[in-house]
DNA sequence: CGAATATATGCACTGATGTGTATATGCACG
DNA sequence: CGTGCATATACACATCAGTGCATATATTCG
């Protein structure tokens, strides 16, 4: 968790690895095939991803299975939330979603609807 | 728009500048005060932010006013969407819990006290 | 035990990038 | 005009990060 989320995501290869792991748990050699760099490089990227919380590691014999973890994504989402109002006039996310549900029941009488 | 969003956000000073611009349009000298680096550096960061679409620039006499633009944030949000399912399951549980609590509250109000 | 396989790490290199200093450019105003 | 202020840019520099190569570590299997 020592390296910050943005730093980690800045590298394209790392994003590719993350993308790859979306399919589910993978061992290093699988990732190597898709990453286009040497095994040593992948190993180091996985280390960074691990230390920053993006992936978890589970030993399976001599292999190591890596999988995505939600926390950093959530963190990024949190950061992004500060700026949501920039493009989302109406917030329909998170608690706002709940709020909306309540208002649905209550009928929309205000000018809350956009033009 | 040549530099990619993640690359741009990787630099802490740049994120600080973005944060600063959340308060609204600012001229360079304002940003300099808050950024903690020299004016030339700020100028270059603003250039990068501009080229990547994070900010817009509007000349005002000899000054230049920079302001946040939504596009890159939206782009980041789009990227993030691929991974939302990673943690939204949990979030939904959270929402459900909240909902439940609210219903509880409502019930309590309707029927008087129970426990 | 020794060989084979999977993954991690030390070393060296290189390209990219953030920064300061100094200077250029652009605008305003006497 | 010419002086002053706001901002941009050229240059030099130092640091860092990603990479390959070679090698170490760990585990499985014969």
Image (cartoon, coloured by chain):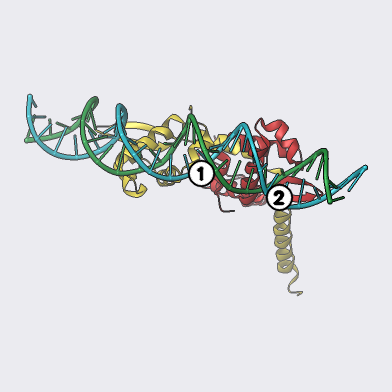
Chain colours: A red, B yellow, C green, D cyan
Q: CA distance from mark 1 to mark 2?
A: 29 Å
For mark 1, does the 10 Å Cα neighbourhood hold few (<14), some (14 to 19), or many (20 or more) residues? some
Mark 2, residue position: A56
Task: Tell me if B30 is positioned left or right of A4 in this view.
Answer: left
From the viewer's side, name the closer residue of A112 and A70: A70
Task: Tell me if A60 is positioned left or right of D8 in this view.
Answer: right
From the viewer's side, name the closer residue of C22 and A15: C22
Give the residue drawn at x 73%, y 67%.
Answer: B110
Q: Are marks 1 and 2 on the same chain?
A: yes
From the viewer's side, name the closer residue of B33 and A55: A55
Residue B36: give x, y in percent of width and height: 35, 49
Task: Tell me if B82 is positioned left or right of B32 in this view.
Answer: right
From the viewer's side, name the closer residue of A79 and C18: C18
Label 2: which secondary element: strand
Q: Which mark is residue B92?
A: none
Q: Which mark is residue A83?
A: 1
Residue A4: give x, y in percent of width and height: 54, 49
Q: Is residue A100 visible?
A: no
Q: Is residue B70 above or below residue B108?
A: above
Residue C28: give x, y in percent of width and height: 18, 32
Placement of the C terminus of chain A among the 4 image quadrants: top right
Give the residue drawn at x 38%, y 32%.
Answer: B47
Task: Tell me if B40 is positioned left or right of C8 in this view.
Answer: left
Q: Is residue B114 above or below residue D13?
A: below
Q: Is residue B29 visible?
A: yes
Of tags 1 and 2, which is closer to the observer?
2
For mark 2, does the 10 Å Cα neighbourhood hold few (<14), some (14 to 19), or many (20 or more) residues? some
Label 1: which secondary element: loop
Residue A65: give x, y in percent of width and height: 76, 46
Give the residue drawn at x 70%, y 65%.
Answer: B105
Mark found first going from the N terminus, 1 or 2: 2
């Amino acid at each position: 968790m020592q390296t910050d989320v943005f730093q980690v995501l800045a590298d394209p290869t790392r994003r590719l690895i993350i993308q790859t792991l979306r399919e589910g748990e993978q061992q290093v050699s699988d990732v190597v095939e898709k990453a286009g760099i040497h095994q040593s490089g992948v190993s180091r990227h996985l280390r960074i991803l691990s230390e920053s919380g993006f992936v978890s590691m589970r030993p399976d014999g001599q292999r190591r299975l890596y999988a995505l973890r939600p926390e950093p994504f959530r963190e990024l989402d949190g950061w992004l939330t500060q700026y949501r109002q920039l493009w989302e006039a109406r917030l329909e996310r998170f608690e706002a979603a709940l709020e909306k549900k309540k208002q649905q029941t209550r009928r929309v009488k205000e000018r809350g609807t956009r033009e």
